[in-house]
Amino acid sequence: MFSSASSEVNEDSDPSHPGLTERSNALPAVPLAELPILDLAEFQLLEDQVDNPLIARTFAGDFAKLWVQRYEILATAVEHGDVAAALNAVLSLRTSSTMVGGVRLADLAAQLEEHIRKSELREARPLLKEVAECGHLTVQELKDSYVLRND
């Protein structure tokens, strides 16, 4: 089901290996504003993968509860120029956003990840405001949807 793929992260940094960034760049670019904040079909994939809607909803609830803390860790790492911590935080954000169906937030995280991987933290800073706003909207839509409506 879920597997540890730490070697994939290392392979992605190798220019001869087609990494996540290259695969995502091969897809047609969609303007950020056209991406939905929340895609419940993506969340339903998580429900199917764990074969238990309660586990998936608990994960989404934890995502919502930890949003502020997760964002602060990312922003602090970027602001302090800590590439390793920023990469760890943005990968966590990108993965968890994708799992809960936060399509736009996952896309923003991918953009931020690209800057971080290139050690362009100064260029990454302007994206932090967009990430903060989009994260808040993602959490709100999760709470307004069936996913967390009863939490």
Image: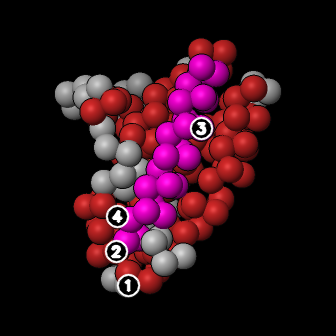
Q: Chief secondary structure of the magenta span? A: helix
Q: CA distance from mark 4 to mark 3?
A: 21 Å
**SS for callout 3:** helix
Marker disc for residue 143: none
Residue carrying label 1: 52
The x, y position of residue 103, in whole percent, is 36, 46
At 59% across and 15% down in the image, what residue appears? 123
Marker disc for residue 43: 4
Q: CA distance from mark 2 to mark 4?
A: 7 Å
At label 2, counting other C-alpha atoms closer than 10 Å, the crowd grade (few under 14, some 14-19, many 20 or more) is some
Q: Which residues are magenta?
A: 124-147
Q: How is the image coloured?
A: secondary structure
Residue carrying label 2: 47
Residue carrying label 3: 132
Under mark 2, the amino acid is Glu
Q: In terms of sequence position, does the residue under pointer 4 or pointer 3 come before the other?
A: 4
